């Protein structure tokens, strides 16, 4: 099974979502081995993982892999090798304004593509102009991929009604793209949880004595667990 977080725009929360989904309790219960894969040449997660190793943090069931090449064959061989040793792969795909090689590859090989998107004209336009044409091309070649693409409402207000946000996207999304039945709220904790290579769950343990921070961490963990459960629900249908 391969899950990819894809969006041609940068700064949409893909890396945060990918790493915390990989370490989610829900995935850990369902899969014996989980691979977190970064295709971003900038190596944001690679640096984060390096900090984890330096701090001696427990990797649990998760292994990390960084593929920085721009050659399609290298992607294919790398993912095939990783898939042979892991039950599920969670991929972080870089934002790409031109070329979109990583994006095309991820959309083609993934069982599920999650597209973080805000309720903004800029995000909707970027999706329509840059990502949706790729999705249409892939479905044309492989019709069974019609159910693989799902938008995740992101950077939503924590008090926004989930059903309203989902209905909004269901109304505007084009054919063969659905809205995930989960949301990714904007929370300040997502900006600082990952210091010293921590994931969200480790950060929550570190701040449990601070009532305010612990409450924020608990809410963020609930976000990730809901997203993870929704994803596996689709994969296991």
Image (cartoon, helix red, strand yellow):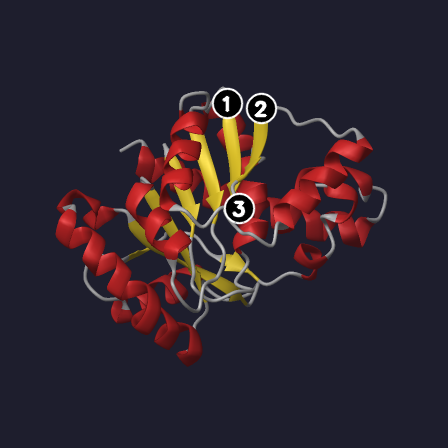
Q: Residue at x 53, y 46 (%)?
A: 68
Classify the position of the N terminus by image quarter.
top left
Instruction: Find numbered disc 2 in the image and state the secondary structure of the residue it sits on.
Output: loop
Going by the picture, which residue comes out furthest to the right? Answer: 209
Question: Residue 139 appears at what percent x and percent y?
Answer: 18, 52
Q: Can you identify the residue that label 1 sits on?
A: 33
Mark before the other along the chain sequence, 2 or 3:
2
63 to 202, vertically: above or below: above
Is mark 3 in CB contact (under 8 Å) with mark 1? no
Classify the position of the C terminus by image quarter.
top left
Counting every numbered tag in the picture gives 3
Q: Can you identify the residue that label 2 sits on?
A: 61
123 to 145, vertically: above or below: below
| Separation of marks 2 and 3 at Cα, in angstroms | 23 Å
Instruction: Find numbered disc 3 in the image and state the secondary structure of the residue it sits on.
Output: loop
Front-most of residues 190 and 71: 71
Q: Is residue 150 visible?
A: yes
Q: Residue at x 79, y 54 (%)?
A: 212
Query: Which is closer to the viewer, label 3 or label 1?
Result: 3
Front-most of residues 99 and 57: 99
- Quarter of the image where one finds residue 77: top left
Q: Residue at x 20, y 58 (%)?
A: 137
Q: Is residue 10 left or right of residue 59?
A: left
Question: Residue 232 appears at what percent x and percent y?
Answer: 39, 36
Going by the picture, which residue comes out furthest to the bottom? Answer: 121
Front-most of residues 82 and 215: 82
Query: Which is closer to the viewer, label 2 or label 3?
Result: 3
Question: Residue 208 appears at what percent x and percent y?
Answer: 80, 41
Mark before the other along the chain sequence, 1 or 2:
1
Q: Can you identify the residue that label 3 sits on?
A: 68
């Amino acid at each position: 099974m391969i899950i990819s977080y894809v969006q041609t725009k940068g700064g949409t929360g893909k890396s945060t979502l990918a790493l915390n989904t990989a370490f989610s309790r829900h995935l850990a219960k369902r899969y014996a081995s989980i691979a977190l894969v970064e295709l971003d040449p900038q190596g944001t997660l690679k640096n984060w993982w390096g900090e984890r190793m330096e701090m001696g943090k427990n990797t649990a069931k998760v292994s990390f892999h960084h593929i920085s090449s721009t050659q399609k064959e290298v992607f294919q061989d790398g993912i095939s090798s990783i898939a042979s040793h892991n039950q599920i792969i969670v991929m972080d795909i870089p934002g790409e304004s031109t070329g979109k090689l990583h994006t095309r590859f991820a959309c083609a090989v993934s069982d599920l593509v999650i597209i973080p998107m805000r309720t903004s004209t800029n995000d909707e336009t970027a999706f329509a102009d840059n990502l949706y044409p790729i999705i249409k091309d892939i479905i044309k070649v492989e019709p069974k991929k019609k159910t693989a693409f799902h938008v995740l409402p992101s950077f939503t207000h924590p008090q926004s009604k989930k059903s309203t946000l989902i209905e909004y996207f269901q109304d505007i999304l084009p054919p063969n793209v659905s809205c995930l039945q989960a949301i990714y709220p904007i929370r300040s904790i997502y900006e600082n949880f990952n210091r010293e290579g921590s994931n969200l769950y480790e950060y929550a343990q570190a701040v449990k004595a601070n009532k305010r921070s612990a409450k924020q961490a608990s809410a963020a963990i609930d976000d990730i667990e809901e997203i993870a459960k929704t994803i596996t629900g689709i994969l296991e249908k």
